[in-house]
Image (cartoon, rainbow, N blue to C red):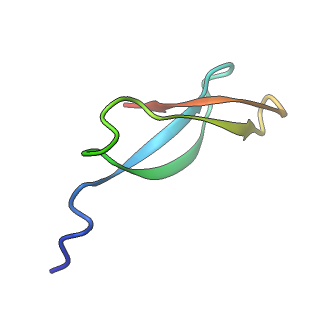
Amino acid sequence: MPKGREDREHITLACSQCRSRTYHTVKNRRNDTERLELRKYCPRCRAHHPHRETR
């Protein structure tokens, strides 16, 4: 069994303006302990906004 996938965690990103959950990604929970925040395009707002990791 491969050992490389044990630290990877599936997360959902939500728009900081409208709170819609439009993106899903994977992060390494050992290297990135705090919440991930990326600037992505929100189709509901029709603009680029920061998207934060939801729990």
Q: Is residue 4 left or right of residue 22?
A: left
Residue placed furthest toward the right:
46
**Extreme residue in the top direction:** 17
Instruction: Compare residues 2 and 13 and report the one nearer the observer.
Output: 2
Q: Position of residue 15 (x, y in %)?
A: 63, 28
Q: Residue furthest front?
A: 31
Which of the image's four quarters has the N terminus?
bottom left
> Residue 8, percent across and down?
31, 56
Identify the residue shown where x is 68% and y is 19%: 17
**Depth check: 21 or 16 in front?**
16
Q: Position of residue 16 (x, y in %)?
A: 62, 21
Say if 49 sits above or below 40 in the image. above
State which quarter of the image contains the C terminus. Answer: top left
Q: Residue at x 30, y 34 (%)?
A: 33
Specify whether 32 is left or right of 3. Answer: right
Q: Splitting the image into 4 quarters, where does residue 46 fall?
A: top right
What residue lies at 44% left-to-right and 31% top-to-bottom?
Answer: 54
52 to the left or right of 15: left
